[in-house]
Amino acid sequence: MAKDFLLEIGAEEIPDWMLPPALQQLRERFEAVLKDHGLPGEVAWVEATPRRLALKASGLPLKQKSRTEVLTGPPVAAGERAAEGFARRHGVDPGQLKAVQTPKGEYLTLKKKIPGRRTIDILAEELPRIILQIHWPKTMYWTGKNGPRFIRPIRWLVALLGAQVVPFEIAGVKSGRTSAGHRRLGKPKVRVTIAGYQEELERNYVLVPASRRRRRIEAGIAALLEGSGLRVKEDPALLETLVYLTEYPTPILGSFDEAFLELPMEVLVTVMRHHQRYFSVLNADGTLAPRFIAVMNTADDPEGLVRRGNERVLRARFNDARFFWNFDQRRKLADRVDDLAHVTFQKELGSYLDKARRMVAIVESLGGDEHACRAARLAKCDLTTEMVGEFPELQGIIGGLYARAQGEPEPVAQAIYDHYKPVTMDDEIPSTHEGRLVALADKLDTLRECFRIGLVPSGSKDPFALRRAAQGVVRILVEGGLRFRIPELAGGDEKLIEFFDDRIRYYFREVRAFAYDEVNAVLAAGADDLPDAAERLAAIRDVRPTENFEPIAASFKRIKNILRQAGYAGDDEVAPEMLMEPQERELYDAFRRVRAEVEQHRGRGAYRAGLQAIAALRPRVDSFFDHVLVNAPDQRLRRNRLALLANLLKEFSSIADFSEIVTTRS
């Protein structure tokens, strides 16, 4: 009979950002135990709140199936005493042993039936290991040195297989059937069953599913703003944080003095989001309203005590921001350049003043104008301001705002404002050409200099976020239409060029969702010019469904194999007078026409028409292979036919290496 299983690990509050990866590990480790012990069943769900990790599995048997193992004993030549000893160790009569011929000679073997263990015993043995082997960024002892380690002290354990408790113990905490409700609103001890687990905890103000907490937050916000003409500033990352910070979330609407709206919206939003975890509220026209939404971990706030407390804290933070803004205006960004000499970029790479000078040089090499160069010189100056010292999330942004307030030309201010972009895959690239050049210079300098001193990412370690920097370079080049060559941007560093290649492939496959073989085909034809590569990829994706595309790709693969097997690596011109068969003359004439047509589109991005023209060669190529003997006995004819195929391959592989396209046709 199959049973359900429930595990809950109760602990002191766990940081929100650690919970989703811990849940993934819990799922994977439990599934591995089932697999290793040959137990059927599957994980139904994993969930977490700040005080608990929970897993439910279904379809677990009461015990393993019995199995038969063949045990190999001593060689027959070892004699009777060795055979008796082997049999005695396994509790059988020597007569049950059988001689089996193996590559090493004749050996005694024993077929032994291994009875299946009870599932409850297996789980009791494995669960402590599953729990304590979850990897956390940091762990702690709470029972003394050399005791069990976990992210926070474990306070209770629920482990049920059907109605039975799975017995085990961690650091003096024994498993049972008693959970805990909300720290303030619920009972400290809540007896649970598998079937009623979520409902029993909900009655004690714990919403176990993250999806329930998310819906409660969203519905609460909608109710607070209904009919007001206001809307919440969308922030999926903040919503995710609040989901895992709470067990029973309830949004509340607060307000602040309209006088603070004199500060830039970016400053106010940053203070609310990063320091208080509040949602900002917008007017219908998108401007910031003097309102905020906080999410408290309790059911209600009937007397407004929580709301007023949040308003008081926010007022103090906004006063700090206003003070820093006014204080920083005493010195212009241009007056702060030399101060960068006292801000370390990296101990082996010098100061941010050194970095700023390198950035200016890179912008100049990319053809940047005076605005772009000035923006590069001033981009890092906000690192010396009081505002960024208090609110580091504003670096770059505050520099752009200060530049605008201090009368710098708008292209300079906007370039500084945007130069950290894109920060994430969802972030936009800089909005201006000057901003794109400064952003490239910043990221390229970090990449070049770190690679120069050997700070190359390995595995999951990437302390200087070089993967993100390289991905940003790729996105700016492609989405900004900048046709700089990757080897030149990499400063000729072969390792950095390889690193860019990996990021380019990732971008086109995972972000732009091109098929892997299409990416391989285009990059094999060259990808120094990334906007051009993107255009070729788009053309291949458009033309691929047409009837002639995959067959012509298969033919190109055949051509490549023929040339390799023939050892032909020449670049001979085709001699038209030696084209003896009508099919090879027709292919040659068609090739010349298509080559001229493709040349009309080359460099203009109109690759679709060129690819369609190449695909239209299919009947001529098929006819050539059906009627013409490439490896002709006459060496001159043979070399001329190989030259024709080589010219076909070389000419059209400048768009893509069609032999990389995976086809159903051999």
Image (cartoon, rainbow, N blue to C red):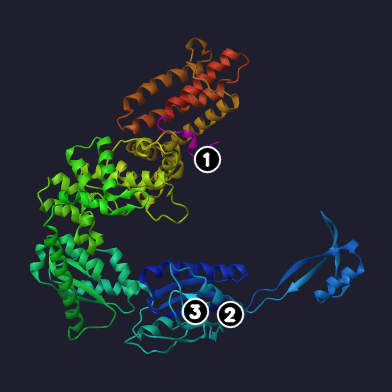
Q: CA distance from mark 2 to mark 3?
A: 13 Å
Which contiguous range is marked in magenta? 654-666
Nearer to the camera, 307 or 568: 307
Image point 58% across, 24% down: which residue?
A: 567
Nearer to the camera, 62 or 477: 477
Query: Which residue position is annotated with label 1?
Result: 664
Q: Amino acid type of disc 1?
A: Thr
Image point 64% across, 75% down: which residue?
A: 64
Question: Residue 355: image x %, image y %?
Answer: 29, 46
Nearer to the camera, 157 or 522: 157
Image point 22% across, 52% down: which residue?
A: 339
Task: Point out the image quarter for the N terminus.
Answer: bottom right
User: Dot 3, how many residues are within 10 Å of its Cα: few (below 14), some (14-19), or many (20+)?
Assistant: many
User: Dot 2, how many residues are within 10 Å of its Cα: few (below 14), some (14-19), or many (20+)?
Assistant: some
* Magenta highlight on residue 122: no
Q: CA distance from mark 1 to mark 2?
A: 51 Å
Query: Which residue position is annotated with label 2?
Result: 124
Question: In the picture, residue 299 is in which quadrant?
Answer: bottom left
Query: Which residue position is annotated with label 3?
Result: 6
| Dot 1: element | loop
Q: Is residue 490 left or right of residue 326?
A: right
Q: Amino acid type of disc 3?
A: Leu
| Dot 2: element | helix
| Dot 3: element | strand
Q: Nearer the viewer, mark 2 or mark 3?
A: 2
Whichever of callouts 3 and 1 sits on the residue coming sooner in the sequence is 3
Spot the residue most to the left: 259
Residue 93 in view, yes or no: yes
434 in relation to 241, above or below = above
Q: Are marks 3 and 1 in contact (CB under 8 Å)?
A: no
Q: Nearer the viewer, mark 1 or mark 2?
A: 2
